Image (spheres, rainbow, N blue to C red):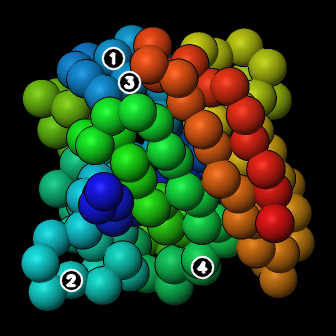
Amino acid sequence: MSYIPGVLVYVRQGDKVLLMHRNKEPNLGLWIAPGGKVEPGESPYETGCREMLEETGLHVSNLQLRGFCTEVSPFPEWMWFLFIFVTEHFHGELLADEREGNLSWVSLDTYFNELSIPQADRIFAPRILNGSTEDMFQAKFTYDQDLKLVNWQAY
């Protein structure tokens, strides 16, 4: 069994967060933080900066690691180590890579209460975005053969 290292980056602007409405799998039709897979030779931090530039056109800095989640399932292609960063430091012009999805600044209240988001994100996002900058959320999420969340444990 091997895990896929991935990165999510929540860019905050006041009480809003930049989200992507996915138009392809995984997470088709759901709202997520931009991110992607760690490439060979990259650190998760470098991946966050690269993915943000590729998917949003934004140059980000001062990424704060606020979460580390393990996702397991019966499928080898759905075994993830997720590094979750938050930043308020960015510049550039917002330009969505529409192959991935459409971007929007969304209020935290709308994100937490109204949008369709992945099951694990519904659990970790409020803890990561509402916690203090010193808090680090760690958890394991277990999915069944239908990729439905069946169990999770925070550490």
- The local secondary structure at tag 3 comes to loop
Horizontal and vertical percent position of residue 112: 76, 29
**Given contact means CB atoms under 8 Å apart, are the residues at marks 3 and 2 in contact?**
no
Q: Which residue is mark 2?
A: 42
Camera-side residue of 60 and 4: 4
Label 4 packing within 10 angstroms: few (<14), some (14-19), many (20+)? some
Mark 1 sits on what residue? 28
Report if residue 23 is visible in the image: yes
Q: Is residue 71 above or below residue 110?
A: below
The residue at which mark 3 appears reads as: 27
Which residue type does callout 1 highlight? Leu
Label whose residue precedes the other's in the sequence (2 or 1) = 1
Q: Quadrant of the C terminus?
A: bottom right
Residue 113 found in image quarter: top right
Badge 2 crowding class, 10 Å Cα cut-off, few under 14, some 14 to 19, many 20 or more, is few
Q: Is 148 situated left or right of 132 in this image?
A: left
Kindly identify the amino acid type of the residue bearing the numbered disc 4: Gln
Q: From mark 4 to mark 2, how far is it between C-alphas?
A: 17 Å
